[in-house]
Image: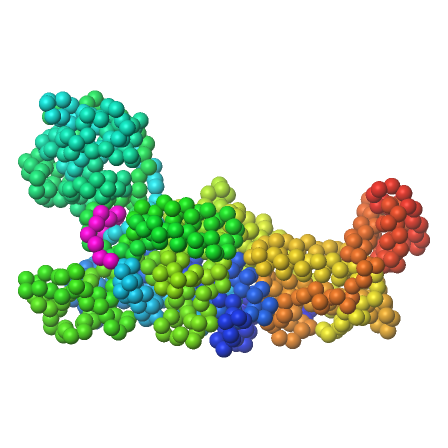
Amino acid sequence: MPEKITLDGLERKWREVWARNGTYTFDRTAPRSRVFSIDTPPPTVSGSLHVGHVFSFTHADAIARYQRMTGREVFYPMGWDDNGLPTERRVQNHYGVQCDPSLPYDPDFTPPSTVPSRPLPISRRNFVELCQRLTAIDEQAFEDVWRQVGLSVDWSLQYSTIDDTSRAVSQRAFLRNLERGEAYLADAPTLWDVTFRTAVAQAELEDRERQGAYYRLAFGLPGGGTTYIETTRPELLPACVALVAHPGDERYQKLFGTYATTPVFGVQVPIRAHPLAQPDKGSGIAMICTFGDLTDVIWWRELDLTTRPVMGRDGRLLAQPPSDVPAGPYAELAGKTAFSAKEKMVELLRAAGALDGEPRPTTQQVKFYERGDKPLEIVTTRQWYIRNGGRDAALRAALLARGREMTWSPEFMRNRYESWVEGLAGDWVISRQRFFGVPFPIWYPLDAAGEPDHAAPITATTLPVDPSSDTPPGFTEDQRDKPGGFTGDPDVMDTWATSSLTPEIAGRWGLDDDLFERVFPMDLRPQAHEIIRTWLFATVLRAHQEFDSLPWRTALLSGWILDPDRKKMSKSKGNTVTPMALLEEYGSDAVRYWAVSGRPGTDTAFDTGQMKVGRRLAIKILNATKFVLRFGVAADLEAAAVTEPLDRAMLAGLEAVVADATRHFEGYDYARALERTEQFFWTFCDDYLELVKERAYADPADPATRSAHAALALALRTLLRLFAPALPFVAEEAWSWWQDGSVHRAAWPSAGELAPALDPAAPATLLGLAGTVLGLVRKAKSEAKQSMRTEVAHLTVRGPEADVLAFGLVRPDVQAAGVVREVTVEAVGETVLAEVRLA
């Protein structure tokens, strides 16, 4: 025990001890019944962690530490989500490069020492190597933060979503999806980000407000009439394939089944009925284009309409019009961005007399890729899909049932899952037109003209594989991209298609079946609530398809961290706080105290004031431990030695705390467990220690003194274990001063430990009663501006008869603590009061 109490250096000291002793190493020989496995969120390795990560990861760590102390072997891996757009973007900006898959690999390539003014084109393989180099640096920085926070993960269980294990598991799962018909390749309307040039899934959408305008266009009708539609996207007029109105709209009943003529282009389009049309919106009749938004896709599919694509993958209108659209007027739009094409289309409409009135300003919700800067377009592309219930009612119902089978903490979060599943509009597009990701383990045979046969894919037999550099069975490399040979699938999997398999990746499914059977299905998935629609749902989907089970039993959802303006902290908003400076200034336990104080699913304010409270608590734990140990209490004192009513009352109160904390931890409410423990601890320090210290300093041979020592030892041993999940460093430090081994491998306290010390005649309320009277004595001395050691000549205690009688059990300790000569008690009134006469 050091002479001077300090929190400084505890993190470094115990990090090294835990690593050296393998304190958190998972015992993989433990049977499944003794294993508690956690599907740890792999943070995106692109930049730096922020305090929101510390917040949510500390919640899971508190649960892991509790479970370990209950005797479970905790499977607690750490993963890194290092493939996908965020990593590519960071590499492009960091090195000043741009991937060009047409370039050959340069084995001697060295990135520029300074970022060039224009991106340097490099081959795909060189680009991937730079991604791997930068993510390795970021991962080490992330690991340093997590070790400083005190996460009790087993660092030998690390994985990344691009390593060999992840690629093998992801590719195996995809091939099995393909074999069962759950994965398929299709040409279909696809949400497309024109900046990143890649497909985007429904789960990655974000609605943003944009200022726009309604344009009223005149369409010709049979017999020379006119009907008007209102649109915010006149540039898509050449893509118009139909007009649509509600089947119950009397204004258009006679037009259903006839044709209208598009202004400027003169193309005939059918007029159809559909219940999604809104009679009270605009003129009540709308044009269907391929494609302006997701509703267009629904109408196009359900009404079995033709396709007239005009939007290219670069966000510009295609150079050539659809085959039945006149090339003359279209040439005015070809190659223009959507914005420029809109301006030109409005000019053409005005010139043709087909624009009715002036544009009417409006504010509209426009769909963006959550990481993108430009509105999404919908283009027809060939993509890989996984069936997810969006077009299959039976599968949707099964996934809803899985959600009800799962335990949710908090329970109301299940509603978000169900809302997402019920609102799915299509299958999950899992292919991405990017470079740093898990490749599809697929090649296509080429016919005599060199065209790929997408209907007859060649699948890999050895995993992992990269079709861009590996050859398929039965072929040689010199046949690549040549007629009669083969070509590799150029796409990679969406990062969620890999992350949706984190239980399988961490458990090494198909690679180490003995381990997998011990940890799957996992016990806990901790995660943020905003990715229920992506990570949680997708993981449930993949486990349902592959194993006909849930991937884990319980989902623990954390809330957001709010900045001083009550806005969510996020990298995209630029209002995040990096954690290392906080950890160093306040101490890791203080930051963890703030984090663990946040209830599951509840948004929590970023509050350094709360961290200061946590730091004071950590220091108080050390000071209280040192104070108790100065009495020479032994580590193995037994509860049977406790005989005094005050001691028994204190331990009765502690027994209730143990029961409550255990119940809260079992219900994943780490915050209430900490709150209950802390409340008792301050009572223990402020009241019990003051009340008992005179007796504790007395003759060790006296049974009353031995009772105090045993009670102090039992309470300290119990409190340090109760604090250990939330404040691991200070709990370990205090424990090491008088106990063998690590507190984090000690048994979680149980009421049975304290039972021999309990007595119904000394209820827990006795400590509160004694503390109340002692507090009144202190108050009198304080108001008289006297020292707390000033003698009290006479103390009169008045109160209800039951309290007055009970006070007799603790009277000696109150007299000693308050330095009171004489005491008189009076059974009167309904509240305990004290009259104090100082000497």
- What residue is drawn where x is 83% and y is 50%? 773
Answer left or right for 829 relative to 736. right
Quarter holding residue 835: top right
Is residue 403 something that shows in the picture? yes
Above or below, 378 relative to 149: above
Is residue 500 something that shows in the picture? no
Which of the image's four quarters has the N terminus?
Answer: bottom right
Q: Magenta stretch?
A: 184-197
From the image, give the main secondary structure of the stretch colored magenta: strand
Answer left or right for 273 relative to 54. left
Residue 158: give x, y in percent of width and height.
42, 69
Residue 143: give x, y in percent of width and height.
44, 65
- What residue is drawn where x is 22% and y is 26%? 253
Q: How is the image coloured?
A: rainbow
Residue 694: give x, y in percent of width and height.
84, 63
Check residue 314 for magenta coloring.
no
Q: How many marks?
A: 0
- What residue is drawn where x is 72% and y is 60%? 654
Camera-side residue of 230 and 333: 230
Above or below, 180 relative to 188: below
Camera-side residue of 243 and 104: 243
Camera-side residue of 251 and 411: 251
Residue 123: give x, y in percent of width and height.
20, 64
- What residue is drawn where x is 38% and y is 53%? 534
